[in-house]
Image: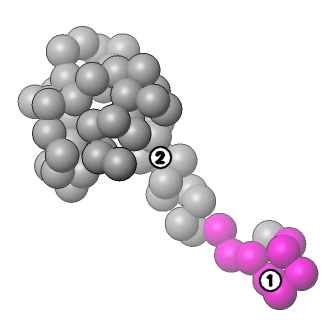
Amino acid sequence: MSIKNLIKILLDIEVNTEDILKLRENPKEYVTNEVAIEKLQDLFLLIDLAGSQEVNEYGKY
């Protein structure tokens, strides 16, 4: 599945790039409104927070 399709399904916004790095660096260039920008920023924050979590062998943080 493409980045565009996943973002549409998850956030109900349309982006005009498949390059997630460029989208993260400058979302204003790839969406049409402020609400979409905020949603993308929240998505990237969630990704960052999930990546910083450590899980031990018992599945505990």
Residue 22 shown in magenta: no
Q: Residues within 10 Å of mark 1 (few under 14, many from 20)?
A: few
Q: Which mark is residue 45?
A: 2
Relative to the observer, which residue lies in front, 36 or 15? 15
Q: Residue furthest front?
A: 1
User: The residue under label 2 is which amino acid type?
Assistant: Leu
Residue 58 included in the magenta stretch of the image: yes
SS class, disc 2: helix
Q: Which numbered tag is attached to residue 56? A: 1
Q: Position of residue 14 (x, y in %)?
A: 27, 23
Residue 53 figure quarter: bottom right
Amino acid type assigned to the residue bearing label 1 in the image: Asn
Overall secondary structure of the magenta stretch?
loop
Give me the residue at 17% from left, 51% from top: 19
27 shown above or below 51: above
Q: Residue at x 46, y 40 (%)?
A: 43
Asked whether the viewer can see residue 25, the reply is no
Q: Is residue 6 left or right of residue 27?
A: right
Tag of residue 7: none
Tell me where the magenta segment starts and ends, as one range.
Answer: 53-60
The answer to whether 9 appears left or right of 25 in the picture is right
Give residue 32's position: percent from left, percent from top. Answer: 18, 15
